[in-house]
Amino acid sequence: MRASNNQLLGSLEPVAWTALSVNGRRVELAKGDVLHEMGAPLGFVYFPETAVLAVASETLAGESVNVALVGEEGVVGAFEACGSRQSFATVTAQIAGTIWRVPAGAYREAFGNSPGLRNQIHRYIEMLLVEARQFVACNALHTVENRLARSLLDAHDRAKSTSLSLTQDALAQLLGVQRTTIAAAISTLQREGLVQSGRGVVEIVNVAGLERASCSCRQTVAYARREIQASTAEPCEA
Ligand SMILES: [Zn+2]
């Protein structure tokens, strides 16, 4: 069976990949498919390939905001599968595509048996913490246009496409701002010839220009990702 293009799965030693792939299967997702529901028992761990997943947090009043996009660089459900075994976020397919779906029990068994998988997951947790801290700083310090440019490039990295199936509502949720604010920011980027927006799709016209319009947080996170991935430090549980 061919290896997955999910970066975590693709980096595993053959024994760990076999343990996960024998018990899991590749699934094609449509936009809007729900994978995890807030408060529900966790059945599966998902490793995106071409699909991009949106992770949404909810308030007690029932409001819901997408707080992260996860693509081929990541996984959802891995920490919960080894922890509380329930989901504290709602996870849906933001962009259609394929994922690897692994039953939570099979994932736990592979995690227990594979130092390589544990090492990859530990590095991924470290990366998520770096991103979370940086995005808190970004929200406080940088303009909506800067942050929108960064978010579109992040989605571009994950979807591997310049045509992004993202509505203005979805972008407003991701950045935690009003839809009218996003509409104005998209208009600004459009006037500068960087993007073209319409019918729930944002087309990136000029990737290099959008990089220049993005805030420095993108480089900060990319630097941390390279350092974490390239580190030759011995895993704790080798
Ligand atoms: Zn920023």
Image: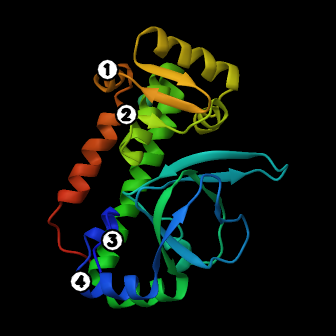
Residue under the image location 47 percent in, 8 percent down: 191
Residue under the image location 32 percent in, 69 percent down: 4
Give the number of the disc on residue 14: 4
Q: Is the distance from the Cβ of mark 2 to the nearest ligand 1 atom less than 8 Å?
A: yes
Return the disc, 2 or 1, that comes first in the chain's sequence: 1
Query: Mark 3 and mark 4: span between their CA atoms?
Result: 10 Å
Nearest-to-viewer mark from 2 and 1: 1
Check disc 1 and give the amino acid type.
Answer: Arg
Which image quadrant: the C terminus?
A: bottom left
Q: Is residue 95 above or below residue 9?
A: above
Residue 106: image x %, image y %?
A: 47, 88
Residue under the image location 62 percent in, 19 percent down: 183
Residue under label 3, please give it: 9
Residue 109: image x %, image y %?
A: 43, 91
Give the number of the disc on residue 217: 2
Label 1 Cα neighbours within 10 Å, binned few <14 / some 14-19 / many ≥20: few
